[in-house]
């Protein structure tokens, strides 16, 4: 419990460990089916971030039975099952309660070899940092709620949030990866801070290389930034140094809380370019090398 990893690991024997995680939340999109897809992809992501393969899942549901039609719940569950089927994960049960607000998610169990667990704190000097999905889901969802995002942008962000990190995890398994995490509620810099905390190394991020969803910067410049981004900045600001060229808008994007975000992979420096190319071939087309780990630095992050 001394470190905040993405999931719990229980060693069964010398060849097998279980990965266990749980995640659920309130709707972030209007369509129930899409909400189910996003919630399922988000819950499975922590297993992929640990380097494992999800195997079984159980539904977690809170539903306002007196004020919402059961057809809504049916569509949520259908969306979740669609993503579980894509991931080849078996739904083996679940639990539901009555509540004033709809909530949905999953408890997930995965498998991994004990020697292949990717704890987020194991970064090494010389590693290259690769991000597999663009940033901006929090900011764009705020714009959607305000009625300012186009249908095309709304559809784009929905599909990204519902996309599994399965291909990215399967691809990185063939490379010399030291650490990994998925970028979710704490934003890119918040989750990166968890990787460098206590490691004694520094990290340098090149902001221009960070993939960002279309219109994210424009919406951020309009002030459509979720409260979570400001909380993330307040908490981790002491660890981060920004070059003068990195304005407040870009800082907001880098702290933007993500839903079902991409993997942040720390890979041996000599393999960084090959990993990005292989990810692109595997369909993870927005993956990009965004920075590097260097010796010294006292557990700080520099953004240039």
Image (cartoon, rainbow, N blue to C red):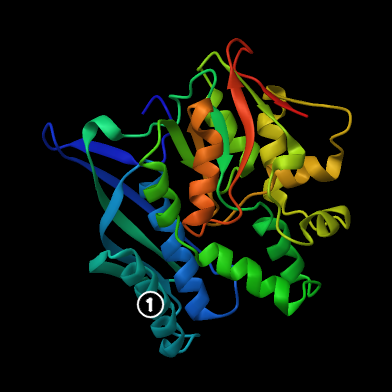
Position above or below: 97 against 121:
below
Q: Residues within 10 Å of mark 1 (few under 14, many from 20)?
A: many
Position above or below: 233 against 223:
above
Task: Tell me, yes or no, if residue 48 can be seen here.
Answer: yes
- Look at mark 1 in the image and give the residue it sits on: 77
Quarter location, residue 218: bottom right
Provide residue 209's location: percent of width, then percent of height.
Answer: 71, 41
Provide residue 126's location: percent of width, then percent of height.
Answer: 54, 20
- Relative to the observer, which residue lies in front, 95 or 169? 169
Provide residue 204's location: percent of width, then percent of height.
Answer: 67, 25
Question: Which image quarter is the N terminus in?
Answer: top left
Which residue is at 77% across, 76% downward?
150
Which residue is at 55% across, 63% downward?
161
Which residue is at 43% across, 83% downward?
75
Quarter location, residue 303: top right
- Relative to the observer, which residue lies in front, 3 or 213? 213
Q: Is residue 195 left or right of residue 222?
A: left
Provide residue 138's location: percent of width, then percent of height.
Answer: 67, 57
Position above or below: 241 against 54:
above
Q: Is residue 82 left or right of residue 124?
A: left
Task: Tell me, yes or no, if residue 102 can be seen here.
Answer: no
Residue found at the very far top of the displayed protein:
296
Q: How many marks?
A: 1
Question: Which image quarter is the C terminus in?
Answer: top right
- Relative to the observer, which residue lies in front, 258 or 131? 131
> Mark 1 falls on what kind of element?
helix
Which residue is at 65% across, 58% downward?
137
């Amino acid at each position: 419990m001394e470190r905040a990893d993405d999931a719990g690991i229980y060693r069964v024997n010398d060849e097998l460990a279980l990965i266990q995680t749980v995640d659920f939340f309130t709707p972030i999109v209007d369509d129930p089916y899409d909400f189910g897809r996003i919630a399922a992809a988000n819950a499975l992501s922590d297993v992929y971030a640990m380097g494992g393969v999800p195997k079984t899942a159980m539904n977690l549901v809170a539903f306002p039975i007196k004020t919402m039609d059961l057809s809504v719940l049916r569509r949520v569950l259908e969306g979740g099952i669609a993503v579980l089927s894509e991931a080849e994960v078996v739904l083996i049960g679940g639990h539901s309660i009555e509540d004033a607000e709809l909530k949905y998610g999953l408890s997930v169990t995965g498998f991994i070899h004990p020697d292949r667990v990717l704890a987020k704190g194991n970064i090494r000097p010389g590693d290259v940092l690769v991000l597999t999905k663009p940033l901006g889901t929090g900011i764009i969802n705020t714009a959607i709620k305000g009625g300012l995002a186009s249908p095309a942008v709304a559809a784009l962000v929905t599909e990204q949030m519902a996309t599994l990190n399965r291909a990215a995890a399967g691809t990185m398994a063939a490379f010399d990866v030291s650490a990994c995490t998925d970028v979710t509620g704490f934003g890119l810099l918040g989750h990166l801070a968890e990787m460098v905390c206590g490691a004694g190394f520094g990290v340098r991020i090149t902001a221009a290389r960070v993939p960002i969803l279309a219109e994210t910067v424009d919406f951020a410049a309009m002030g459509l930034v979720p409260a979570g981004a400001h909380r993330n900045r307040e908490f981790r600001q002491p660890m981060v140094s920004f070059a003068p060229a990195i304005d407040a808008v870009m800082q907001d994007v880098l702290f933007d809380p993500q839903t079902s975000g991409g993997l942040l992979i720390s890979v041996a420096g000599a393999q960084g370019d090959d990993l990005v190319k292989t990810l692109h071939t595997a369909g993870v087309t927005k993956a990009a090398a965004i920075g590097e780990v260097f010796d010294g630095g006292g557990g700080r992050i520099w953004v240039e």
